[in-house]
Every structure is written in structure tokens, then in C-alpha cells.
Image: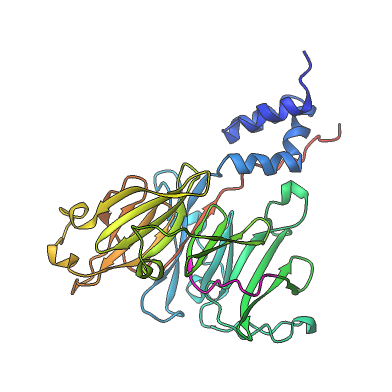
Amino acid sequence: MDVSGDALGLVLERVDSHVSLIRAAAVCRRWRRAIADAAFLRRYRSLHAPPVAGYFCNEQHSLRLCDTRLTFVPSSPSIVDARHFSLDFLPDGAGSWTILDSRGSFLLLCEASSVEFPDKEDPSTAGLGRRLLPRKHFLLDGESSEAGGRISMYNFRVLFVFFRGGVTQAAMYAMGSSWSKKNIDPRLNVSVPVGHSAGCWYFVEGRALTTLDGSTGDFSSSELPPLRDLDSDTWTRNFFITSGRDGKLHIFTVYDNTMKMFTRLEGGEWVLEKMIALLEATRGLPGYKPSFFSGHQFILTIGAGFVILMPQAARELWPFSINLETMGAAPAEVGMGVLVFECELPWPPALHACLDR
């Protein structure tokens, strides 16, 4: 019995192993063309998260931006060799650069010694330069339909967000072209990033949540509803957003030495799902002292599935991490930077052979 194209697509979308998908593409030309189709690849990536090789971070040795070292931490040291992800090939070595953003297996970097963006050559965007770099440049998927718009060395965009005259403005760079102005809502505020997850950036201003979609480069806004467990102070300190393995968006807060996790339901409602007392969760860790929890906890690093905290009251460095899935605590390192950047392996693989025969 011949299977219709739509039914075949639904079956192939449920193949969760990249090895099995490649084997399916080798069955016949029809299956190979279906799997190589750009629309199929977009749907497939929305259903299956790519494998993560590890995480890059701007390891800081002091508060100076230029005093950083790019570090790669493998997701599974027994399987992934960190030497294959070394950035020492960069001009003047990896220590001369800072990571601004990542997408897929690509990194957006700038010279760590520079805190200003170089002037553009395009006169239509004159004046966009000489702005502070951190968290204002975003690496986006390309617009090309090839491979479903997947980012590549020949198909990527960079979004530059800046402030002028009290309003938010933006410029877009696409591979093969020059900088051009991008129209966005001037009321958007992206000065306070609170998370980077599943290809999106999140920003908070008051109770307004702004989302930047890394696939399209578009912004959207929504309002965070009033929650009795959150007060006005919580929104501006020790607050971050990420997504879990279930694909749902989560808000995490650290206040009065208690970590809470709020989950957004399908209807948009936020509900309290988990709560952990840090004083008890960290008991038993090396160097633990109850006095560490007489004050607030600082968020040092936000990563995929974890957060690193440091007690304000500790007279010595005593960082610890919280697993956001299990809420378990463990000793941690200082200096990874505020954000870590995932390095995803290309997924699904690009297929080019025998598509037209």
C-alpha cells in the first residue's frame, strides 16, 4: 500500500534517533527527498532537541571584561573530548575574545579588549557603532530556505539592539549583505536579560516579559500575572527564566534563601510547581555554614538545567549549584560568567545526495 506524502511526513517526524533518520533516508529516493525537504526539517527540529556537545563560557578571573578565558565544558566528559572544541586557533588566542551569543554549533565573538562596537561601513546605518557590547548582539538563524533556514557559515544573521533618544532601536546584518535598520516596537526594553533557552532570549521590565525568537528575529511581549508568591523586589533581583526537559517555560526565583519554580501552563497561567529551602538543600556540602544563609543569595551563573549561587553573607567564596530538574545541590566553581552557551551538534543532518534521481 502506497503511503501518502502527509502520512509519510508524520511517520518520519517521530523518528527520534539521528542514526535512524539517516538510515530512513537511505531506504529510497522518495524518503530521502521527504527528509531533505526544508519544511520537514523545520518541523523536525521543533519536535526533537539537538544533541548538546557541551557548553562554552566566558570564564572570568576578575571584574574586568578583558580578563576572561573561553572555556568549553563537555556535557559528557567520557564521550566528548574537550580538545576538539578548543578555540586556541583564534587570532591572538582564545583569551583575547569574549562570547556574545551562540546558536547551534556557532559562536558570535568579539575582541575582549574592546567594549565598543566598530563603526559600520554602510552609511545608511551610520551612528550605530560605539555602543556597549554585552548582551546586545544576538546570533539568529538565516533567512535562506536551504536546510530549513538552519544556521550555517553562509546563512546567518546578527541582530544589534541599542538605545537612542530614549527608545529601543535595532539593526540587522545578514550574510552576504550589509547592516540595515530593523523595525521594532520602540517601547521594548531589553536592558535586563533574564534567560536564554530553547533558542530564545527573555527580558523583564516590571511585569512585562519580552521574548526574542532566535529563528525569526522577532520580538513579542506578554504580561507576567501578579503572583502572591512574588513581590516587586523579586522581579528585579534573583529572577531568571529557562525551559525544562518537558519543553515548558519556567520562572525561577531566589528570595529569602528559598528557591521557587513557576511553570507556565498551556493557557498561559503561571503556577508554583516546586520550592526548595536552600539552607537545608546545601547542608552536608563541604564548607557549609548555617550563617551563610543569614542574607541573600547572589546568582553567579545561569546554565542549561542549573544555576550557580553564592551567599552574600559568606566571608569566603562558597559557590554552589542547584540542578533545576531535581533541585539537588552540589559544589560549584566561580568565574563561569553570568551565562553559559550551549554547543549543539548539527541536527538533523543535511542530506544532499541523490535527491533528484
* Count of residue discs: 0
Q: Is residue 45 left or right of residue 93?
A: right
Q: Is residue 191 magenta?
A: yes
Point out the image quarter for the N terminus: top right
Query: Which residue is more in the foreground, 198 or 80?
Result: 198
Estimate the x, y position of residue 28 in percent, counting from the top left. Answer: 76, 25
Tell me where the magenta segment starts and ends, as one range.
Answer: 184-193
Query: Which residue is more in the foreground, 222 or 7?
Result: 222
Q: Is residue 289 above or below residue 15?
A: below
Q: Residue at the far right: name it.
A: 357
Q: Residue at the far top: name it.
A: 1
Q: Is residue 267 left or right of residue 141?
A: left
Q: Is residue 13 above or below residue 272?
A: above
Name the residue rendered at 23%, 66% in the picture: 318
Q: Is residue 120 left or right of residue 247?
A: right
Q: Main secondary structure of the magenta part?
A: loop
Q: Is residue 143 above or below residue 337?
A: above
Estimate the x, y position of residue 15 in percent, counting from the top left. Answer: 60, 30
The quadrant where residue 26 appears: top right
What's the colour scheme?
Answer: rainbow
Q: Residue at the far left: name it.
A: 290
Q: Is residue 152 magenta?
A: no
Query: Which residue is more in the foreground, 67 or 84?
Result: 67
The quadrant where residue 221 appears: bottom right
Q: Is residue 62 left or right of residue 36?
A: left
Name the residue rendered at 70%, 87% in the picture: 127
Name the residue rendered at 52%, 43% in the picture: 266
Point out the image quarter for the C terminus: top right
Estimate the x, y position of residue 335 in percent, counting from the top left. Answer: 36, 69
Estimate the x, y position of residue 336 in percent, counting from the top left. Answer: 39, 66
